[in-house]
Image: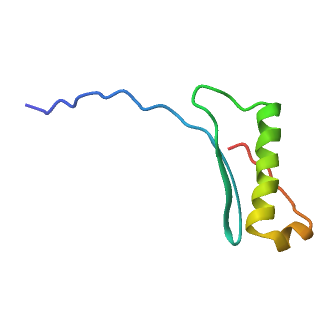
């Protein structure tokens, strides 16, 4: 007789916006469960990214920063 597996409900999806470069992770910004990204939330994330770059790699902030957006 084949084994029956108990079905467990999924924990759910969690959306994160992450930024990195060749030196490592700069910022991971988690979105609140049940919400979607909108322009206001994205502006807040980009401001957090600016602060994270200034804090972690201040020398890079003096150089130009190029972002590549990919909605995977």
Query: Extreme front residue here?
Result: 55
Location of the N terminus (image quadrant): top left
Q: Residue drawn 77% across and 49% down?
A: 48
From the viewer's perspective, is residue 19 above or below residue 11? below
**Quadrant (top left/top right/bottom left/bottom right) for the C terminus:** top right
Image quarter of residue 37: top right
Q: Residue at x 83, y 56 (%)?
A: 67
Residue that appears at 64% across and 36% down: 31
- Position of residue 33 relative to residue 47, above or below, is above
Instruction: Please name whichever residue, 17 or 53, is drawn nearer the observer in this view of the structure.
Output: 53
Residue 8 rendering spot, x and y as whole percentages: 31, 29
| Location of residue 21 by image quarter | bottom right
Q: Is residue 7 above or below residue 59?
A: above
Q: Which residue is pictured at 68% across the width and 55% down the height?
A: 27
Q: Is residue 16 left or right of residue 69?
A: left
* Residue 62, x across and y down, in percent: 91, 70
From the viewer's perspective, is 62 left or right of 33? right
Where's residue 15, x and y in %?
Answer: 61, 38
For the rendered model, the colour scheme is: rainbow
């Amino acid at each position: 007789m084949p084994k029956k597996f108990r079905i467990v409900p999924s924990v759910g999806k969690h959306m994160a916006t992450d930024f990195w470069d060749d030196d490592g992770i700069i910022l991971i910004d988690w979105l609140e469960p049940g919400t979607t990204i909108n322009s206001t939330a994205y502006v807040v994330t980009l401001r957090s990214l600016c602060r994270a770059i200034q804090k972690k790699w201040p020398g890079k902030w003096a150089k130009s920063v190029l972002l590549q957006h990919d909605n995977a």
